[in-house]
Amino acid sequence: MPSPKRIGKIKFGLLSPKEIRTMSVRKIIWADTYDDDGFPYPQGLMDLALGVIDPGLRCKTCDQKAADCPGHFGHIELAKPVIHVGYTRLIRKLLRVTCRACGRLLLSPDEIQKVSITAEDEFGGDVLTEKDIKKERACPHCGELQLKVNFEKPTTFSEVLLEDGKKIEHKLTPADIRARLERIPDSDLRLLGINPDVARPEWTILTVLPVPPVTMRPSIILENGQRSEDDLTHKLVDIIRINQRFKENQDAGAPQLIIEDLWELLQYHVTTYLDNEVAGCPPARHRSGRPLKTLSQRLKGKDGRFRGSLSGKRVNFSARTVISPNPNLSVTEVGVPLSIAIEMTVPIRVTAHNIEEMRELVLRGPERKSLKVPCGANYVIRPDNRRLRLGGDNLETIAEQIEPGYTVERQLRDGDIVLFNRQPSLHRMSIMAHRIKVMDGKTFRLNPAVCPPYNADFDGDEMNLHVPQTEEARAEAAILIAVQENILSPRFGGPIIGGIHDHISGIFMLTHDLRWFTKSEILYLLKYFEFEHLPEPGKVEEDGTPFWSNKQVFSIILPTGLNMVFRASSCVNCDECKDEGCERDAFVRIIDGQLQTGTIDKKSIGAFDGAILNRIIRQYGMERASHFIDDMTRLSIRGIMIDGFSFGIDDEDLSRTEYGQIEDELSKAEDDVDRRIRIFQEGQLEPMPGRTPEETLEMQIMQVLGKARDRTGEIAGRHLGLGNSAVLMAVSGARGSMLNLTQMAGCIGQQSVRGERIMRGYEERTLPHYRRGDRGADAHGFIKHSYKGGLSPTEFFFHAIGGREGLVDTAVRTSQSGYLQRRLINALQDLKVEYDGTVRTTMGRIIQYQYGEDGTDPMKGAFGDPVDVKGIVESILKVEV
Amino acid sequence: MVPDHQVMSEDEVKTLLARYSITFEQLPKIYHDDAAVKQINGKVGDVIQIVRQSQTAGIAEAYRLVIRRPKK
Ligand SMILES: [Mg+2]
Ligand SMILES: [Zn+2]
Ligand SMILES: [Zn+2]
Ligand SMILES: [Zn+2]
């Protein structure tokens, strides 16, 4: 392999008219493409000297056939020069810094000395700018009076004359501009950071236009036999037509007005040919109304040459479909529909050891009628790289034929490793390696516990799947990218895979307080688990029937020797913790793999928290941890199915007493607000430090109303206990919060825009329903009803205002963070931690002398600390420290 | 607030480059008109040692080559 070379410098230049003519193989004068027989016109846009695209024809320039001819440039002689849109800024600058008569830089030698010290500065670049030229009216070299140069997008330049005290704009034609640019001496250009050897400024005004080879604008033949030309060809046709007409009019001595019109039209066509999205220029359109894709559009943007064709491309051996959940799959597995498994293949080299197996695969061929049928093969590749498609009658012959050295492309089967991905791929866990399981149906199936790293849900999300094609790729997938290797997030060093939603509700319902199960119940819960004996029953009734506690059931999936002490999500941080005596059963104590007290919830097994999961990873490794996740998801789903779990509209109902209390609470708050407003209006309000009385009043009102809302929540919460699904979900951390419940059953509360009460609308009021200057709660977006109770029309309107702000915020945030992410990735993508611990670029330049300054892998640490001292001590002492 | 900046001696620089087996060009850069560089009178081509308090490592050392700030 050649050693990497260092780029010393990059030189940018312009194509001179001479160069354009030299590289051209043909002068193009006809706008027509093909004659009636479908043969290219000589000197037309599809001239055979420009390269060939039709099979069978030979290129007139290089005499090669369609596939081998690279294509060759032609050229068009323009009737009059036109401006190249890409260089209008440069042209404007040059017109403003040079003399309109002699073309010299508008600076005396002394001034040049002052502004640019070293012309041959190492950093070169734009030494002189427009700002360095004072608004000087006379040229220091010839004394000519200078005029202001105006530029109007896209390509109009004009000089401003002062006549009789009036300003008159005098348009500069491209020819005028070209003449002026020609006069600028080479030495002055160097001061402007332009190398005149490769970029004379007059070359930015086109006198001759290169015609790109036909190979980059091939015509396609439609189904009805008609030819359809490329957008570029269409544009070139326009240019040649106008050019032709222009020439004829010019030769016939047409009036100046017509010439000017034609000139402008030619300029328009050349401009849109180069860039069809210039500001101030209506885009050229196809007959259908679709804007044409011209040169600039081929390069720019997401689907352009750089981002669309070079940085990223479409790939083979990939599949995409909708995803759906299956808690019975392991997190390390992915369910693949049979129809995809049949289509996708893994290449296997035939050796002396596997030749019999390969023969069987070939004999089975591409057909696979059901899941029970073992996989077959789709292709056989001979040692000379010929591909043989298997199918129909050739199975036996090819099976006979194969011998070591052949490659068989085998269909996917259970256990094959694949890469699974969901866009946007924002972190490395967005692509993980799973083992496949061929299944019925048409969707990819995955364990809901792997949703958090992919940020997936099942409301129609689609995901991609890639099949690695080499041993190296498969090894890499299994060792580095596998799901179990990515349970810990490098972002915060904790588990990112874990229970969600029903897993948490289920495990909470299963493990909360003490429950006793009969043998048949415990076997229902545990029937899918691998264990040898049931534990000793925790309790035996007098009649001899054994019972097992819910904590014993959960302990079965814990590894032996696990010791942990912590507080669950449901802990409310009482002033003095009652430890084991906690009435909420929130004190979790696990001794030697036995759950003694406490409820398992989000804190223990949830994604992003997963305290138990985290400990298992550190103590028993990734493999055990992924087993634990599988067991936990299955157990929790069975746990939730014992009682069943649902949420309905009547779960938000309260009794008459609570409604009365809520009413009282809210009217008390409104009275309080009115009282404060009165105090304010009487001028008695004591302003808070650094605030106006108005601001103080606003803050007080917000505070009073906020408190009232919270109090309604408390009233509702008193009525709705853990028997309520919403409360259970909020307490266990599965979904939602007590605030959500407050708003559903109690009171929605204050709507706000930018953290303040709603103030906008009409003069001194938000809606015509209120008096001017009304500062009351309801006039500024306080919603006293609940979602269940229903909103009044004004409340509904305020709610929509508040809701809109949230939507705008998220929309803006996602687009901004997406762009930031792109920039960061582009800047950081090649950085690498070397074996000496330094972070370096590919050129070996040092970015950090120690990765993260301490050389610590966040995944090996404990939530930011290098060692989890507290956890280790607790697990040995078996008490909370 | 400002971490400690020191101009390194020629020998120190030599050992530094040897330690990481790098050339001058591969060092991180700092502009000649950086306030901290001006304060210790660093010149273009000097290597500056920066010792700063680190949230993760306690104390972290870094080294930067002084270069001219390009115009504009
Ligand atoms: Mg979705
Ligand atoms: Zn050719
Ligand atoms: Zn002059
Ligand atoms: Zn407690």
Image (cartoon, coloured by chain):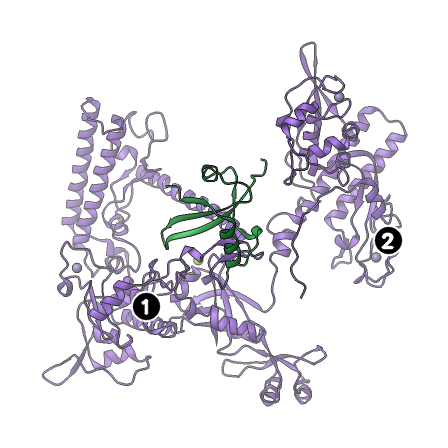
Chain colours: A purple, B green
Along the line of sight, the residue nearer the viewer: A147 or A61: A147
Quarter of the image containing the C terminus of chain A? bottom left
Q: Chain of mark 1?
A: A
From mark 1 to mark 2, how far is it between C-alphas?
Answer: 70 Å
* Image location (x, y in percent) of residue A234: 76, 46
SS at mark 1 in the image: helix
Going by the numbered disc 1, the residue's amino acid type is Leu
Which residue is denoted by mark 1 in the rendering?
Answer: A613
* Image location (x, y in percent) of residue A226: 78, 55
Residue in the image at 66% along x and 24% along y: A111
Which of labels 1 and 2 is toward the front?
1
Q: Quadrant of residue A384?
A: bottom right
Which residue is denoted by mark 2 in the rendering?
Answer: A49
**Mark identifier at residue A207:** none
Which is nearer the N-term, disc 1 or disc 2? 2
SS at mark 2 in the image: helix
User: Is residue A42 placed above or below A353 in the rendered structure?
Assistant: above
> Where ligand 2 lies, by image quadrant?
bottom right
Quarter of the image containing the N terminus of chain A? bottom right
Going by the numbered disc 2, the residue's amino acid type is Ala
Residue in the image at 66% along x and 62% along y: A3
Horizontal arrangement in the rendering, residue A870 relative to residue A543 (left or right) = right
Label 1 Cα neighbours within 10 Å, binned few <14 / some 14-19 / many ≥20: many
* Image location (x, y in percent) of residue A562: 26, 73
Along the line of sight, the residue nearer the viewer: A765 or A66: A66
